[in-house]
Image: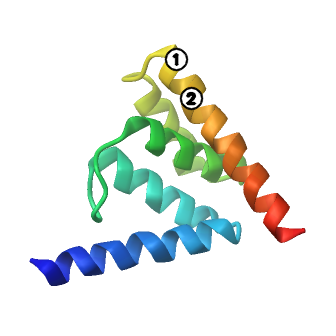
Amino acid sequence: MGSSLKSASFLVESRLHDAARGDCTACYDLGVAYSTGTSGVCFDLIEAHKWFNLAAIAGDEAAQAARAEIAGDMTAREIAIAQRAARDWLGINRAQAA
């Protein structure tokens, strides 16, 4: 059991690292993980929406569809929080790249 948790943690960490480098597939993968509660993360539609939004901004059509699908299960306030989190993520990572 500990090995699978360690593996899941590594997967999420590597996807976060790739997402920080602008990899939209990593963003999509994180969205899937949070929307399903897999890969060692808890189910969290706000986080899922954030990651799908970041992938969608980069042109990922599957992420656009997934974002729209989960938005149907979210309140307007939750969507606003997710959008703010995506903007914050972009701001932090742009600042680090400069």
Colour mode?
Answer: rainbow
- Where residue 39 appears, as percent x and y from the top left, is 29, 65
The quadrant of the picture occupied by the N terminus is bottom left
Which residue is located at x 17 percent, y 84 percent?
A: 3
In the displayed orientation, state which residue is furthest to the right.
98
Considering the numbered disc 2 on the image, is that residue within a helix, a strand or a loop?
A: helix
User: Which image quadrant for residue 33?
Assistant: bottom left
Residue under pointer 2: 81
The amino acid type, in three-letter code, at marker 1 is Arg
Q: In the picture provided, is 74 more to the left or to the right than 84?
A: left
Residue under pointer 1: 77
Instruction: Compute the Cα span from label 2 to label 1.
Output: 6 Å
Considering the numbered disc 1 on the image, is that residue within a helix, a strand or a loop?
A: helix
User: Which image quadrant for residue 4?
Assistant: bottom left
Q: 71 above or below 24? A: above
Q: Which of the labelled discs sits on residue 93, or is there none? A: none
Q: 76 above or below 26? A: above
